[in-house]
Image: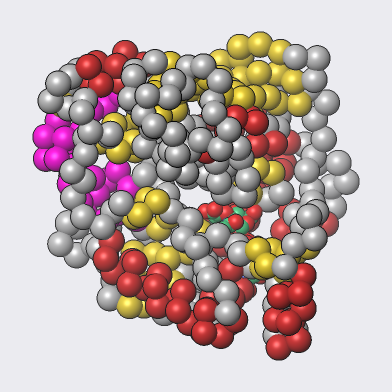
Amino acid sequence: MLVEKNVPLQHCNTFGIAARAHALVRVHSEDDVRALLADPLWGRRPPLVLGGGSNIVLTGDVEPVVLKMEIKGMRLVGETPAAWIVEAGAGERWHDLVAWTLQQGLPGLENMALIPGTVGAAPVQNIGAYGVELQDRFDSLDAIDLATGQGFSLDAAQCAFSYRDSVFKHVPAEPVGQRLDQALPRGMGLAGRAVITRVRLALPKAWKPDMGYLDIERKRAESGVDQPTAQQIFDWVCEIRRAKLPDPEVLGNAGSFFKNPTVTAEQCADIIAREPRIVHYPLADGSIKLAAGWLIDACGWKGKTMGKAGVYERQALVLVNRGDKHSADASVTGGEVMTLARAIQTSVYERFGIRLEPEPVVV
Ligand code: EPU
């Protein structure tokens, strides 16, 4: 196990924020995690797990040791009557997995093409796009308990997925002595308590295109294709994302900065009475999801800049780095991003009475 010291993290987070890790270990296998946990110097404090750094805001140097997840490998590992089971290492890029499954003739992930980040990070916030979420294709995952070094597996129910949420985002309620390699206690959070090493996905044998999202339906209508292939949907999703979302290689960002908030039907009726144009989607449970991008846009934030943090011109839900993401001195700071985020939260609250919740992890 090699512990690197005083490591710049600017190229390890898609915002391009210049912060340093006091110590960093590149994890290529489960044994690398166990070696770190067994080390008397580094194993005492919970590490910070870093995947592609596409959903994180670094507000300063990182004191805990950083585990940079680089476990690789993608393979077909099994089948059920309804699905092919594919397994990928936590350190694979999510988009590479989507492309690889299509090359293998195993469709099902195409709506989630081009989402930045790694496979290991995907279950943490239950990534999703264009009508499909990770939980719709999830089989199981392997993880290591950071308190004991024991490996364990979780199925979808144990991951407790919901919109941009899972057991990995919640702080443990149980004492550290609780064993995770046995049944996971109900309602237990795993934030800071476990690291995901491998993820298995269930790809439907009877594949059907998922066309429920307006942007995709528009592409279908434009192309005149009635029954698109998975590759066509993959291409359309890539085109839609490239047109709407900034490429983090060029303009630093962490994707959607806020979650789309959910309100009751009564609250929504009240807001619609004042703002008839508000973009909203009814959910199965009777509640209503509002488009956070629309709310922020309506408050006049699109294209605005505060310090070196800005609101993207083409999608108000995305905060961007207006500094130089390749320069340690001229890049945006985590503090500037959070100051802008708080100003947006305040103005959306003052106008609509709705509290926006950030999507990325703030460290
Ligand atoms: N809108 C505006 N102004 C804006 C932005 C959006 O009026 O500046 C309106 C749009 O016109 C549209 C609605 O808001 O009617 C929703 O916008 P969009 O379809 O772009 O999707 P979103 O709700 O902003 C979500 C996800 C994205 C995902 C897309 C497509 C969240 C927080 N974000 O964005 O995920 O790609 O849907 O499924 O749920 C991410 O999580 O990082 C991410 C990019």
Asked if residue 162 is among those painted magenta in the image, a careful observer would answer: no
Q: Is residue 138 above or below residue 325?
A: above
Image quarter (top left, top right, bottom left or bottom right) of the N terminus: top left
Looking at the rendering, the quadrant in which ligand 1 lies is bottom right
Judging depth in this view, the residue of 349 and 28 nearest the camera is 349
Asked if residue 25 is among those painted magenta in the image, a careful observer would answer: yes
Give coordinates of residue 161: x percent, y percent.
61, 40
Please state the extent of the stretch shown in magenta in the rendering.
4-29
Residue 268 falls in which quadrant of the image?
bottom right
Residue placed at 88% from the left, 46% from the top?
226
Q: Is residue 104 visible?
A: no
Q: Is residue 107 left or right of residue 363?
A: right
Judging depth in this view, the residue of 208 and 282 nearest the camera is 282
Q: Is residue 94 left or right of residue 171?
A: right
Residue projecting furthest to the right: 226
Q: Is residue 10 above or below residue 206?
A: below
Residue placed at 71% from the left, 75% from the top?
267
